[in-house]
Amino acid sequence: MSQALRKAIIYTSPARSLYVGRVESIFRRTNVVSTLLVSLDDELQLVDGSSRQIHSGTSFLIPAGMDVTINTQGARVAMSFLDDMDADLGRLIPRMKSEVAFGSNRLFTGIEHEQSIIRDAEYLSRERPATEDAFDQFQDWIGQCGASTPCDERIVRTAELIRENYADNISVTELARQVNLSVPRLIQLFKSVTGTPIRRYRLWWRVLATAENLTAGHSLTDAAIAAGFCDYSQFSRVYRELTGGSPSAAKNNTEIRVLKRNGIQAAML
């Protein structure tokens, strides 16, 4: 097997992202968007920081905004980063077998058709299909059915403004003006709808933009600065907080595929 195929792979798009591969054995991350986490090997352990209780399982659905510590026990994982308005979360919750208390929050374990998802993730890792095909498979995991609650269009527009201008520090005051809300009301509504604060959401999109910039041949430092980070040091701190890993290790061990509205980019890193 070639070195490229032994690397992890991440497929990214404007709506969702999917990572398949290994992560650090024990990692802590802040969940900016809701995430479906599935082990391709042994059971995972999620540690509840408030009670130190350990929840074991092969698959977890983790809502946005939660801080989680995960012991992968060396397993390969598929991490599906869901849509930021949580429509995917609403579709997936009825397909999870159990709900567990996790601190003051709740998460879900045991997705239906778990073994089928594991086989699909194995295929993505092994065969590296075209990006459109990978996202078609991703959609099958989430499912097409199930009505989602309509989102507040002002929050949808705010998220669009942040994504379209991720490298710019558009003030919350300006964002609020654009959607005709007061600043306190926008801050409250945004976190209520997305599960995450505006600042953290912006940083998440800068991390994704950094990955996209790498496909254009930039160095890690240049890619991060082009995405809006002040310097590599800031990017490294944010990356570890939001993903639980090291950016340099990820760069050396991850293949990046980007799905754009006008085409596909790929990088073998």
Image: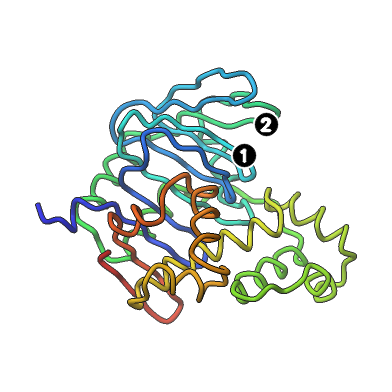
Q: Position of residue 243 (x, y in %)?
A: 48, 48
Q: Quadrant of residue 41?
A: top left
Q: Quadrant of residue 252?
A: bottom left
Q: In the rendered structure, which amino acid carries the disc numbered 2?
A: Asn
Q: Which residue is mark 1?
A: 66
Q: Quadrant of residue 104?
A: top right
Please report the residue visible at 50 percent of the width from the left and 62 percent of the height from the top. Answer: 207
Residue toward you, 219 or 244? 219
Q: In the rendered structure, which amino acid carries the disc numbered 1?
A: Met
Q: Is residue 64 above or below residue 161?
A: above
The numbered disc on residue 88 is none
Q: Is residue 69 above or below residue 242?
A: above
Q: Is residue 84 above or below residue 13?
A: above
Q: Which residue is mark 2?
A: 105
Q: Is residue 232 left or right of residue 41?
A: right
Residue toward you, 116 or 215? 215
Q: Secondary structure at mark 2?
A: strand
Q: Quadrant of the C terminus?
A: bottom left
Q: Position of residue 86 (x, y in %)?
A: 62, 51
Please report the residue visible at 39 percent of the width from the left and 29 percent of the height from the top. Answer: 58
| Whether label 1 touches label 2, CB < 8 Å | yes
